Amino acid sequence: MSKVALTVNGKPVEVEVEHRTLLSTVLREALGLTGTHIGCDTSQCGACTVHLDGRVVKSCTVLAVQVQGQSVKTIEGLAPSFDASGARLHPVQQAFSECHALQCGFCTPGMIMAVTGLLQDHPQPDDQQIIHGLEGNLCRCTGYVNIIKAVKQAAQMMQA
Ligand code: FES
Ligand code: FES
């Protein structure tokens, strides 16, 4: 077992983990942040996507011992990072809601974390950049059309 100190959604935490424990397991089971979903555990679906030191990562592909001293943001930390009270949705969450970019919602937290990373790199993405940016995130329900609409609307909202 090892102790790992990290920051999660702006708060310092310390967890004791086995060397094989995944970051996704720590987030969900040790910290109760169940907005990070597990769809496959084999690095394919993107449901577990979070930000690690500002980079988009699939948390099922990261060992908890690797994140010593690093900063993780999950879907639970997204709205408060935009509006300190957390009372308002982040523009990407708002756009997903307004554009009906979800059905069952299982993929949505990971999709939204991937989109926020995409918009950091491409503040006004075209269709190809959106498709490329979300190729690691699978949705079984929406057909992606409304997800692409939501990304474009979020980009406009964030420019304004
Ligand atoms: S659970 Fe991590 S990619 Fe599917
Ligand atoms: S909304 Fe159901 S998997 Fe994406």
Image: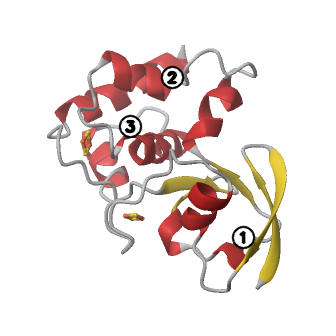
- Quick check: is the Cβ at mark 1 less than 8 Å away from ligand 1? no
Left or right of 103 on screen, residue 3: right
Q: Which residue is mark 3?
A: 125
User: Of helix, strand and loop, which one carries label 1?
Assistant: helix
User: Of helix, strand and loop, which one carries label 3?
Assistant: loop
Ligand 2 falls in quadrant: top left
User: Of helix, strand and loop, which one carries label 2?
Assistant: helix
Q: Earlier in the sequence, mark 1 or mark 2?
A: 1
Q: Which mark is residue 91?
A: 2
How far apart marks 1 and 3 lie (CA) works out to 30 Å
**Crowd class of label 1 (few under 14; some 14 to 19; many from 20; radius 10 Å):** some
- Tell which of 22 and 153 is nearer to you: 22
Give the percent coordinates (x, y) of residue 55: 60, 57
Q: Amino acid at mark 3?
A: Pro
Can residue 154 be seen here?
Answer: yes
Q: Amino acid at mark 2?
A: Pro
Q: Which mark is residue 144?
A: none
Left or right of 107 on screen, residue 94: right
Q: Earlier in the sequence, mark 1 or mark 3?
A: 1
